[in-house]
Image: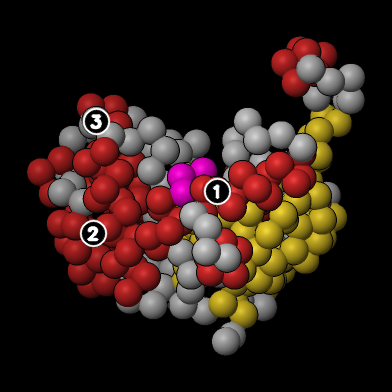
Amino acid sequence: MQEVLTAQALCKTFRLSKKQQQIEKTKESVKVAVDHLSFSVNRGEVFGLLGPNGAGKTTTLRMLSTLIQPDSGDALILGDSIRTNPDAVRKNIGFLTSDLKLEDFFTPNYLFDFFSDLHDVSAADRQVRKERLFSIFGIDRFAEVKVANLSTGMKQKAALAISLVHDPAIIIFDEPTNGLDVLTARTVTDFLQQLRQEGRTIIVSTHIFSLIEKICDRVGILINGSMAACGTLEDICGGKSLEDRFFDIYAEKVGVTE
């Protein structure tokens, strides 16, 4: 298998304010979010990052997406370094996170065209992709409605469609079903399964076991910023459910199960 993404000892820390130290119940002024994290993703596979809140999933994906720089370490995406060649990396990835919001004033139609232009997508390709994605997510009827007036689920579906305007080689989704109602979450999950069947390379972070089990070829379990286990579900679970095996690994790492 061809590796299309290789993370090499990624590290990221953040300084904590006095208030944050109180919230975190720590006297440490620095929080280690990601600690020498290494893993690889193969072409055409769905790789999941599984972990509790605060495990370092979002920080990892933000580094891979060049939104923030690692303190040390690097990652190569299709041979390009996230540290030294971020522009090339951005051309080959699509990134969706619930933390990144679409501008309320604009419509899905306008934003799709705007980001298509940013990625130098031809008018013909733009129209074909727009029709397909808007149809899949039911955005057609809301294409000219301002984002501010869309439901939470429709905003997420519009953001998902817009993240794919340039038909990226690698798709990175951070908690794609977080905060969605069950119907919208099902639509997003079904679409991820469709992308998998098309042989797309996808990296997805979540704390939802069923999503990992449905769509992922391999999974990396993140605990306190470190890779606690990585492999196929069969390799990691050994006959147990993913949920049971996760809590076994969590207990080994931190000494508690809750």
Residue 72 falls in image quadrant: bottom right
Distance between the alpha carbons at the discs numbered 2 and 1:
36 Å
Viewer-proximal residue, 91 or 235? 235
Few, some or many C-alpha atoms within 10 Å of disc 3 (few <14, some 14-19, many ≥20)? few
- Element under label 2? helix
Q: Residue furthest front?
A: 239
> Amino acid under label 3?
Ser
Residue 14 falls in image quadrant: top right
Quadrant (top left, top right, bottom left, bottom right) of the N terminus: bottom right
Q: Residue at x 43, y 58 (%)?
A: 213
- Element under label 3? loop
Kindly report which numbered mark, 2 or 1, lies closer to the viewer in this rendering: 1
> Amino acid under label 2?
Leu
Viewer-proximal residue, 129 or 224? 224
- Measured as percent of width and height from the top left, residue 76 is found at 69, 71
Q: Give the residues drawn in magenta, as a range.
A: 205-209
Judging by the rendered image, the residue that carries numbered circle 2 is: 133
Mark sitting on residue 244: 1
Q: Residue at x 42, y 38 (%)?
A: 178
Viewer-proximal residue, 166 or 121? 166
Visible residue check, residue 26: yes
> Amino acid under label 1?
Asp
Going from N to C along the chain, the mark reached first, 3 or 2, is 2
Number of numbered discs on residues: 3
Q: Residue furthest left?
A: 141
Q: Residue at x 76, y 39 (%)?
A: 254
Judging by the rendered image, the residue that carries numbered circle 3 is: 151
- Element under label 1? helix
- Measured as percent of width and height from the top left, residue 133 is found at 23, 59
